[in-house]
Image (cartoon, rainbow, N blue to C red):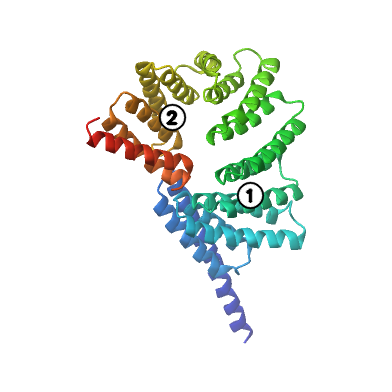
Amino acid sequence: MRLSVFCTLLIALLLSVRGELAAQSFREKALEAAKAGDSATAIDNYEKALNSTLKVFKEDHVEVITARLELGEAYRAAGRWTDAIGQLDYVWQRARFDAEQNKRWDGEEGHLAYAAGEKLGRSLQGAARYPEAATVFATAISDGEKGGREVTQLLTLDALLADTLLLLDRVQDAEKGLARARERIMSSQADRPEAQVRMLSTLVTLYHHHRQYALGLPVAQQVVDIANKNLEPYNELIGLAFSNHGAIALHVDGQLNEAINSLQAAEQIYVKKLGADARELTNIQVNLSQAEALKKNDKEAERHGLEALRLARLHSAPDSLDVALSLHNLANCYMTLKQPGKAGDLLENALSIMEKNLGHDHPQTVEARKMLEAAKKAASEGV
């Protein structure tokens, strides 16, 4: 009898070890596939890893929760929003419950809750479920503050919440959140001007992304002032500050010349420090292209636009937002030059990338779709 019990326990132990090893093997294959950009293979192996883990551990075990988090992130990366939300919402709710029950917001449960909250919110954004995304991000910020998370992690959530609120056209609420983020930056980085420049620059980028140029301009100017006052000449962060200032000022009435001056200053710094192929020059070329278009210098606008696309393709994956935005900008040039056929080809590619990365209903995606329709119409009419 004792031997029978021992054998049963031994078999159970061996099966458990076998299950854990199988799950780990599937995880490793999934990671390799994800790094190679093979979403389908990554998802298949993460699903197998979860199933193997469930054979060994109970549903509420941390190994199962982690496996669900990994699978949810794989779904999110592939744009499978519904599947991603299903996995990530479970992980978020479970981890939050455990963190609260065990008073471990600064422990493993809290870390899982933070990771799942960020990824869940992003998935809800991708599915255009913006009110729910805003709730998740706001809750995750509150949880993060309870757990004493690093300022950089909280700022990521601040930016995501503001991004979502701006998508909902809740500009005042977003501005309040961004004001809190600026206070968080200035107080936590009081003696670190380089960190101030980096962190404030992410907020300037957010203002630009949502075309809140007038609101973003004072922040962009603040960053330039901090950089010029505290950093050595030709520091790359001064280039970043000027680049962002130029991108914002470009769209504010009466600021075109200031914008061009800032963009050219940024270009000079990056070329001197990093060379003519520097990745940082991509957006500068996009914005110089737009500036020349505003000045009716169409050929110069096209030249800068082609250079931006070259740099984007040199440094970014074919389906990256950098490539999409460069394609969109160059298409604008071709529409101005009355070449809608060229514009349409570029916009087809840009739209596909934007739908995957930003979602079907994101303002930039909607704009690209409308522009593509206009290009097709103009091409069919021989305009």
Give the camera-side residue of 87 and 260. 260
Question: Which residue type does callout 1 highlight?
Answer: Phe
Question: Which residue type does callout 2 highlight?
Answer: His
Estimate the x, y position of residue 185 in percent, counting from the top left. Answer: 71, 33
Give the camera-side residue of 196 and 355. 355
User: Can residue 362 be seen here?
Assistant: yes
Residue beneath label 2, please?
315
Q: Which mark is residue 355?
A: none
Quadrant of the rendering where the C terminus is positioned:
top left
Drawn side of residue 77 relative to residue 170, left or right: left
Residue beneath label 1, please?
137
Estimate the x, y position of residue 259 in percent, counting from the top left. Answer: 54, 18
Estimate the x, y position of residue 325 in percent, counting from the top left. Answer: 43, 33
Drawn side of residue 88 relative to residue 26, left or right: right
In the image, farthest residue toward the bottom: 1
Q: Residues within 10 Å of mark 1 (few under 14, many from 20)?
A: many
Give the camera-side residue of 204 and 6. 204
Relative to 267, does residue 70 appear above or below in the rendering?
A: below
Q: Of callouts 2 and 1, which one flags the residue occurring earlier in the amino acid sequence? A: 1
Relative to 261, does residue 146 appear above or below in the rendering?
A: below
Could you tell me which secondary element the residue under label 1 belongs to? helix
Relative to 334, does residue 58 appear above or below in the rendering?
A: below
Q: Mark 2 against mark 1, which lies toward the viewer? A: 1
Locate residue 155: give its quadrant. top right
**Residue at x 54% of width, y 67% of height:** 54
**Are the residues at dot 2 and dot 1 in contact (C-beta closer than 8 Å)?**
no
Quadrant of the rendering where the N terminus is positioned:
bottom right
Mark 2 vs mark 1, CA separation in Å: 31 Å
